[in-house]
Image (cartoon, rainbow, N blue to C red):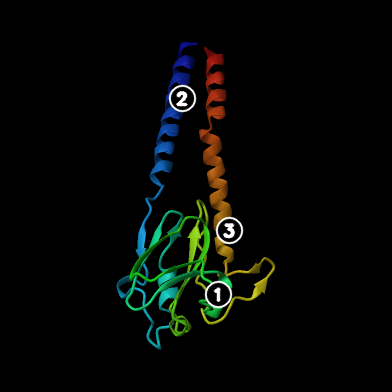
């Protein structure tokens, strides 16, 4: 009986160590909030004629999460936070928020899409507008956004600013399965049941 008890103690110790390491690893994956300078070194300005996709290209090179912020630096211009319709039509008449101090910071406080345009209509039509897709925890990033000149086509779920590839869906399913497995393995109920089973051999 002694060898069995010794083996049980060893198994319990290994199980506890795995739970501790797993918990630390999961906490380490939480990223700190970041501040993004919109447009990178170029900042927020009226794009050149052949560079109308400047801000949509910049957005696809970054991944935004809840808590991050956008910093707009500009001169003789402004930033408007608008809805989807106003974004696609460069409508400056009814913004959700407006900034014109030359150095504006906007916090991304929830998942989903945020729309920004220049307060100067011609600048917006030239490409000075930005869609930001803010990811919630465990959300798979979307692919490249559509051309800013044309609103997306209607689908089963209505208008969608981004197209979601099949590969993202399959990856999301795999990540979901993995998360459930880890949660089940590390749950207090599982630990309690395992401890009770070990106690039976004593």
Is residue 140 depicted above or below 147 in this figure?
above
- The residue lying furthest to the left in this view is 41
Is residue 32 depicted above or below 78 in this figure?
above
Q: How far apart in space, not on screen, are marks 1 and 3 (Cα)?
A: 33 Å
Picture coordinates of residue 140 (x, y %)? 52, 58
**Pointer 2 local density, CA inside 10 Å: few below 14, some 14–19, many at least 20:** some
Q: Nearer the viewer, mark 1 or mark 2?
A: 1
The residue to which callout 1 is attached is 86
The residue to which callout 3 is attached is 170
Is residue 187 depicted above or below 12 in this figure?
below
Q: How far apart in space, not on screen, are marks 1 and 2 (Cα)?
A: 61 Å
| SS label for mark 2 | helix
Choose the circle earlier in sequence order: 1 or 2. Answer: 2
In the rendering, which numbered label is found on residue 11? 2
Picture coordinates of residue 18 (x, y %)? 43, 33
Q: Are marks 1 and 2 in contact (CB under 8 Å)?
A: no
In the rendered picture of this protein, how many numbered marks are placed on residues?
A: 3
Residue drawn 69% across and 68% down? 156
| SS label for mark 3 | helix
Give 116 or 159, whichever is nearer the viewer. Answer: 116
- The residue lying furthest to the right in this view is 156
Residue drawn 56% across and 71% down? 84
Instruction: Tell me which corner region of the image, top left, top right, bottom left or bottom right, holds residue 72.
Output: bottom left
**Pointer 3 local density, CA inside 10 Å: few below 14, some 14–19, many at least 20:** few
Q: Nearer the viewer, mark 3 or mark 2?
A: 3
**Pointer 1 local density, CA inside 10 Å: few below 14, some 14–19, many at least 20:** some
């Amino acid at each position: 009986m002694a060898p069995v008890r010794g083996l049980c103690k060893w198994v319990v110790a290994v199980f506890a160590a795995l739970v501790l390491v797993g918990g630390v690893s999961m906490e380490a994956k939480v990223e700190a909030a970041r501040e993004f300078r919109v447009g990178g070194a170029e900042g927020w300005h009226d794009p050149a004629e052949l560079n109308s996709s400047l801000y949509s290209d910049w957005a696809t090179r970054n991944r935004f999460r809840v808590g991050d912020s956008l910093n707009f630096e500009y001169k003789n211009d402004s930033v408007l936070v608008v809805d989807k319709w106003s974004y696609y039509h460069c409508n400056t008449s009814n913004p959700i928020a407006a900034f014109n101090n030359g150095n504006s910071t906007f916090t991304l406080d929830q998942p989903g899409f945020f729309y920004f345009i220049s307060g100067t209509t011609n600048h917006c039509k030239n490409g000075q507008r930005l869609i930001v897709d803010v990811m919630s925890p465990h959300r798979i990033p979307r692919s490249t956004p559509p051309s800013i000149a044309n609103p997306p086509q209607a689908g089963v779920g209505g208008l969608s600013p981004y197209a979601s590839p099949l590969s993202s869906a399959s990856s999301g399913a795999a990540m979901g399965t993995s998360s459930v497995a880890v949660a089940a393995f590390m749950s207090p109920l599982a630990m309690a049941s395992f401890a009770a089973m070990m106690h039976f051999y004593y």
